[in-house]
Amino acid sequence: MTDDQDGLEAQFAQWRHYVQRRRELRQADADELEDHLRGSVDDLMAAGLRADEAFLVAVKRMGSLDELSREFAREHSERLWKQLVLTGGPDGPVTRSRRDLVVMVGCALGAAASVKVPELLGASLADGSTFYPLNAGLLVLPWLAGFLAWRRRAPVGLIGVLVALFGLGAVGANVHPLTAQSQSIVLTSLHLPIALWFAVGVAYASDDPRASRRWMDFIRFTGECFIYYVLIALGGGVLVGFVFGTFEAIGVSPETVISQWVVPCGAAAAIVVAGWLVEAKQGVVENIAPVLTRLFTPLFTVVLLAFLVTWGVTTGGIDVEREALILFDLLLVVVLGLLLYSASARDPLAPPGVFDRLQLALVVSALVIDVLVLVEITGRISEFGTTPNKAAALGENVVLLANLAWSAWLMLGLVRRRTPFAALERWQTAYLPVYAVWAWVVVLVFPPVFGYL
């Protein structure tokens, strides 16, 4: 076999790998598509094109993989609706799906029980104890990480890394002598779940932790998991309302049971259930997070541009008190999320379009706002001194500034057709550890540095 033929077969193998990830396409469908593609390649090579050129042209003529999978789904819609989470997939994983269900239920029950076990040791959900805010992530996320590690058949060494990360989190949450008025309680309560979520990412990517694509998959998983969790929470709220109404109709008040058992245990278990649902329905229907990204990117772009115009007209300063800092940081995080989820769904071979230019405007606007906030924070620190809250906000804005600045540069190159989209995708996945490191710094280093204030 010649080098050209070897390269062509490698391209076919890569294409087939992407096709087989679409659960709505059966093996027979994938074989039919491949036969069609091979025939088209042969015709183009007979017309004088080289093997690699013929392959690219043939794939382009067939359309994107998403378009092909949607076309098959329309023609065989009954097949799509039958692919429920308990029925398995095209390669016959009914037994595996049921095992996943059993393990998921066990992990969900473990998360629910973990919320109540501390009460046996004196902690309480009702008395305003700081234990639960500090340890919320430690009570629930190890169970989700355990489920993902089991599903990925994580090696023993990586499981040891997960245990070490969650153990480090337990130290950061419980060793420091923090008073009820300490700012570090709020900072730890906000940053420790972020740090531990990246530990969940290690479990998610345990089958190939060094691959950029696996971490991009984890980004997709995060967005979908959040959406599913919100939907479960809304359904749970309706259920709680019915329980209140029906039991009170017979003269029994379920308030204690609901507030002390149903809500906390259900909220903990729902995180594991949401993760399982995302895993179970991969490829069955179009992901929700990228769809929402398409909707909200124009809206946030308009809002940010309106803010900058208003700020320029009024020439007023920016309030950098704690609530305002949290608001601006959340705004920047949302912008970054919009960028990430649009990147996760974008065809890397597609030419730059209007939406890419819109995203560039969004990122540049967020970058300008980040700079304005940093100037205000630096001025307040110089004038009044630093506090844990201001130091954390300063660091977070610097971390976001670096990401947004380089993202804007890469997007400018993409729009000008000088930078491939893959460069932007690699940058986003490579930058993920920076967020985790900063979160660990706030949890572990800030309390002693600031005298446990």
Image (cartoon, rainbow, N blue to C red):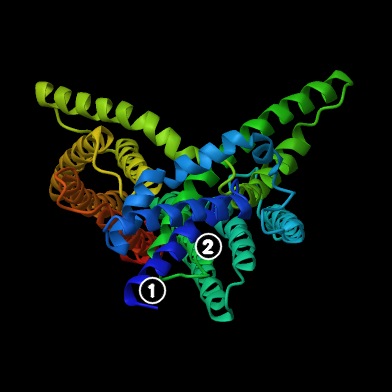
Number of dots carrying numbers: 2
In the displayed image of the protein, which residue is found farthest to the right?
Answer: 250
Task: Give the structural element (helix, strand or loop) at label 1.
Answer: helix
Question: Separation of disc 2 and disc 1 at Cα?
Answer: 33 Å
Q: What residue would you read off at disc 2? A: 204
Q: Look at 18% across and 43% down and name the residue there.
A: 415
Q: Is residue 346 visible?
A: no
**Percent position of residue 1, x then y:** 40, 78
Residue shown at the point (71%, 40%) measured from the top left: 82
Say which residue label 1 marks. 6
Three-letter amino acid code of the residue under disc 2: Tyr
Relative to 197, is 360 above or below? above
The amino acid pointed to by label 1 is Asp
Nearest to N terminus: mark 2 or mark 1? 1
In the image, taking residue 126 as reference, residue 183 lies left or right, namely left
Query: Residue 59's x, y, as percent?
Result: 38, 51
Q: Residues within 10 Å of mark 1 (few under 14, many from 20)?
A: few
| Residue at the extreme front | 46
